[in-house]
Image (spheres, rainbow, N blue to C red):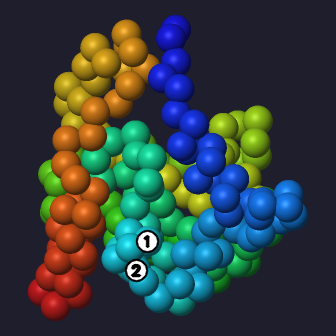
């Protein structure tokens, strides 16, 4: 299978992992957790133990991640409170996506460890990927390329507005 070369993704991830001198610079998720600029960081919601944010490299439009605040790599290191919070935020994510984007289904999970495909293995995070009937076309099969049909800021606004209506409705 041919691969689409995307060096910008590695450079983006590495910019948070190593500074110019090769020293560890910090975690991309911890940086977003400590930042207050939710719109620029595509953070949709913050709870007591985690946040919901859009994935900058989505598999589909509306691809969300639930990221616990604690910098932990292993699933079993999450406390009971953190685990319960992740599940509440996953449920909220699915509800927002159903109302805002009307998907037919979802993929939900985590890549635990580098060998499982985790791009950022040191800070556990969970993916919620909305799926639609027929959302696979020839591009992923022939060119290993996904087509994202909506500007990410537009999707972010839809999700934030939907969250507001859930909270006030």
Residue that numbered label 1 is attached to: 41
Spatial separation of the CA atoms under disc 2 and disc 1: 5 Å
Q: How many marks?
A: 2
**Is 91 on the left or on the right of 121, as rendered?**
left
User: What label sits on residue 29 in the rendered view?
Assistant: none
- 34 w.r.t. 154: above or below: below
Q: Residue at x 37, y 52 (%)?
A: 63
* Residue 91 showing in the rendered view: no
Q: Quadrant of residue 72?
A: bottom right
Name the one closer to the observer, 85 or 97: 97
Name the one closer to the observer, 130 or 119: 119
User: What label sits on residue 38 in the rendered view?
Assistant: 2
Q: Residue at x 70, y 37 (%)?
A: 116
User: Are there few (<14), some (14-19), or many (20+) residues within 10 Å of tag 1?
Assistant: some
User: Are there few (<14), some (14-19), or many (20+) residues within 10 Å of tag 2?
Assistant: some
Q: Would you say the residues marked 2 and 1 are in contact, meaning their CB atoms lie under 8 Å apart?
A: yes
At mark 1, the secondary structure is: loop
Position of the C terminus by quadrant: bottom left
Q: Position of residue 165 (x, y in %)?
A: 15, 82
- 98 w.r.t. 169: above or below: above
- 2 w.r.t. 113: above or below: above
Q: Residue at x 50, y 11 (%)?
A: 2
Q: Quadrant of residue 32?
A: bottom right
Q: Position of residue 136 (x, y in %)?
A: 28, 24
* Residue 164 showing in the rendered view: yes
Q: Quadrant of residue 147?
A: top left
- 9 w.r.t. 121: above or below: above
């Amino acid at each position: 299978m041919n691969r689409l070369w995307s060096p910008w993704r590695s450079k983006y991830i590495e910019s948070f992992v190593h500074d110019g001198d090769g020293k560890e610079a910090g975690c991309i998720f911890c940086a977003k957790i400590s930042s207050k600029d939710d719109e620029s960081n595509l953070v949709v919601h913050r709870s007591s133990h985690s946040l919901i944010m859009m994935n900058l490299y989505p598999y589909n439009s509306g691809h969300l991640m639930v990221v616990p605040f604690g910098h932990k790599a292993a699933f079993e290191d999450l406390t009971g409170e953190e685990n319960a919070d992740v599940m509440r935020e996953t449920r909220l994510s699915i509800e927002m996506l159903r109302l805002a984007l009307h998907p037919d289904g979802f993929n939900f999970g985590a890549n635990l460890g580098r060998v499982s495909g985790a791009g950022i293995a040191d800070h556990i995070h969970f993916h919620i990927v909305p799926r639609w009937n027929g959302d696979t076309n020839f591009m992923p099969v022939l060119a290993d390329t996904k087509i994202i049909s909506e500007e990410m800021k537009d999707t972010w606004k839809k999700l934030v507005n939907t969250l507001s209506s859930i909270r006030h409705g």
